[in-house]
């Protein structure tokens, strides 16, 4: 791992790019070097044709505590530092959301602040039982960043998003699933294994179809119904001509 990549590990194996936050002693919180490393890692995934899916995880007991408060407090120009940190993490999350591969996350322990934004940039989220979810901004007198004021209400609705952002409400894993923040809840110690198996299955699936389905859904928030229908028609017209669809359709028709 190069100095630039301290705080983030990236390994590609069996078509899965495993992107892991690697600052367990700091609850995988984002300081500026880690934010830059995350942005760099996502860009390298985008350029790697061997990647069929992405797995996002956090090392240690907690997935991600958000921004590194100690780094913020210690910055010479606190305002400039926090602004740059928010922008760099946001650039990484926008790139993650734009990937043409499905993204699976495994979360455990605690997910807060920018950690929520990172989680919501993924498509399928497996949470370990016992995980706690909170925005945490109000507790330290800060406001949402990294696109969370955009992604959170789209995941849980405006009123629930405001409750999380304005109060000190903490959700457990079952509540997070019921609210729509996570997809599945796994037993203690099983979230990463289950998420990795899902990533393997997605990596071996019809790459173009999965990638385009992800892109269509994520683009739907900023397009019209008419434009969405046209985009779907264009994509399915292209997909049906590809080998992945040709072979699957032939097997289906032969039943």
Image (spheres, rainbow, N blue to C red):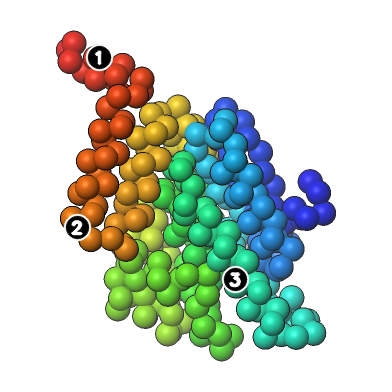
Q: Residues within 10 Å of mark 1 (few under 14, many from 20)?
A: few
Evaluate if marks 2 and 3 touch, with contact meaning CB atoms under 8 Å apart: no
Residue 87: which numbered mark, if any?
3
Residue 225: which numbered mark, if any?
2
Disc 1 to disc 2, C-alpha distance = 33 Å
Residue 38 percent location from the top left of the image: 64, 56
Residue 11: which numbered mark, if any?
none
- Tag 3's secondary structure? helix
In the rendered image, which residue does mark 1 sit on?
251
- Tag 2's secondary structure? helix
The one of 244 and 14 positioned closer to us in this rendering: 244
The one of 6 and 69 positioned closer to us in this rendering: 6
Disc 3 to disc 1, C-alpha distance = 48 Å
255 sits to left or right of 221: left
Residue 59 percent location from the top left of the image: 65, 52
134 sits to left or right of 234: right
Q: Residue furthest bottom?
A: 141
- Tag 1's secondary structure? helix
79 sits to left or right of 103: right
């Amino acid at each position: 791992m190069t100095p630039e990549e301290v705080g983030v590990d990236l390994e590609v194996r069996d078509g899965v790019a495993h992107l892991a936050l690697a600052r367990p002693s700091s609850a995988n919180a984002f300081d500026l070097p880690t934010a830059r490393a995350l942005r760099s890692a996502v860009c390298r995934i985008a350029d790697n044709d061997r990647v069929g899916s992405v797995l996002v995880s956090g090392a240690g007991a907690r997935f991600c505590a958000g921004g590194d408060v100690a780094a913020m407090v210690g910055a010479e120009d606190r305002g400039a530092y926090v602004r740059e940190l928010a922008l760099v993490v946001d650039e990484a999350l926008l790139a993650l959301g734009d990937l043409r591969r499905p993204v699976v996350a495994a979360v455990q322990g605690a997910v807060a602040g920018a950690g929520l934004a990172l989680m919501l940039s993924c498509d399928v989220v497996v949470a370990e039982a016992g995980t706690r979810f909170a925005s945490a901004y109000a507790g330290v007198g800060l406001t949402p960043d990294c696109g969370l004021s955009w992604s959170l209400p789209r995941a849980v609705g405006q009123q629930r998003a405001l409750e999380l952002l304005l109060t000190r409400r903490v959700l457990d894993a079952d509540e997070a699933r019921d609210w729509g923040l996570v997809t599945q809840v796994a037993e203690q110690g099983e979230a990463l294994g289950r998420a990795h198996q899902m990533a393997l299955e997605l990596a071996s699936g019809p790459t173009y179809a999965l990638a385009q389905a992800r892109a269509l859904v994520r683009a739907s928030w900023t397009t019209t119904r008419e434009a969405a229908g046209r985009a779907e028609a264009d994509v399915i017209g292209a997909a049906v001509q590809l080998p992945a669809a040709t072979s699957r359709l032939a097997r289906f028709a032969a039943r």
